[in-house]
Image: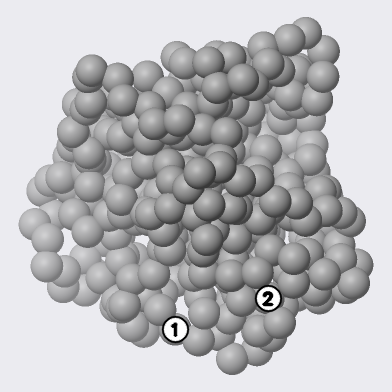
Amino acid sequence: MSTDNTSLHLEKIIPQAEDFLPLLGTDYVELYVGNAKQAAYYYQNAWGFQPVAYSGLETGRKDSVSYVLQQDKIRIVLTSPLEPNGPINEHINKHGDGVKVVALWVDDARKSYEETTKRGAKSYVEPYVIEDENGTVVLSGIHTYGETVHLFVERKNYSGTFMPGYRAYTPNFKSEPTGLKFIDHMVGNVGWNEMNKWCEFYAKVMGFAQLVSFDDKDISTDYTALMSKVMSNGNGRIKFPINEPAEGKKKSQIEEYIDFYNGAGVQHIALATDNIIDTVTKLRDRGVEFLYVPESYYDTVLDRVGEIDEDLAPLKELGVLIDRDDEGYLLQIFTKPVLDRPTMFFEIIQRKGAQSFGKGNFKALFEAIEREQDLRGTL
């Protein structure tokens, strides 16, 4: 099953992007976690992901175990070590649970590797083939910011469950989906003065173009600030905003992330829905915690964004933010960190034509994050 995250109203060609690296979509996101079995239970029961595949001792894999979960076109892989020491343990010890692999679905993994490494990408893994009775999958990979990597996944000649080395994962209990559709964008946090370096990496090595840029005047409060640029591939299916800290009176959310993650990494994953009220209600009722937005935000929001299709009352009750650009409006909400360390979180987003990233909500969002930082004593 493909995981292309195309939605017809979102698909648009980014003219400045080069097409030497055609990307079909996000294939999967892999998190290294301390306990994959329990993490899988959380994402199934709280988030509505469905069990797909498993790899571990029962499949002949001795060093680690992985659970593959899926909801519509979003696929996540949760991996834990089975042995002491080794790279997975080192990653978890240093970073806590977090994203290791952002896998990109391509038509030719060998060509993807060749095109990116000849433009300066550092090799993570040279192209190799895995196979079983259902066909072959070709994989290759490159390093990006921090210890995050991109795997290129070519699965056009494979018809089995996920990929060779995995078997179907079919527990007795399955939760109901929550209406999540595809990955809208994925945000990376990098260190001081590293944003332009990594934006140039995506432009030069992967042919991405810059969609939008935000500076510390756009993204700041009385206390903290950050800078951000949004990079996109040519067909618009892959969008990677890159954040860096900016000078402020107190420690920003980016600095807090860098401190606790011990370096650059994926800060949040934005998941698209067609009905944010229904999705967020289901998530909240299953225990997912969201940032608090003061009721006063809603006193003037419609003056700023104009008429919307939704009733304001449930959006206010849930804490959903609203913003508008030239092409329409969007609805968005952010979870609290979903891990013990204040690092990774999720965004739920519903686009009603808007192609932007909620610039009008930055101040309210950052103040909400600062309230949480203050409770943690990290502001």
Residue at x 41% of width, y 58% of height = 2
Residue at x 58% of width, y 53% of height = 136
- Counting from the top left corner in percent of width and height, residue 344 is at 56, 35
Q: Residue furthest bottom?
A: 15
Q: Is residue 177 left or right of residue 38?
A: left
Most foreground residue, 305 or 183: 183
Residue at x 73% of width, y 44% of height = 148
Helix, strand or loop at mark 2: loop
Question: Which mark, by number, is residue 12?
Answer: 1
The CA span between labels 1 and 2 is 17 Å
Q: Are marks 1 and 2 in contact (CB under 8 Å)?
A: no
Q: Which residue is mark 2?
A: 21
Q: Is residue 293 left or right of residue 164?
A: left
**To which quarter of the image does residue 101 belong?**
top right
Q: Is residue 312 left or right of residue 344?
A: left
Against 57, residue 75 (above or below) is below
- Counting from the top left corner in percent of width and height, residue 133 is at 50, 44
**To which quarter of the image does residue 322 belong?**
bottom left
Residue type at tag 2:
Leu
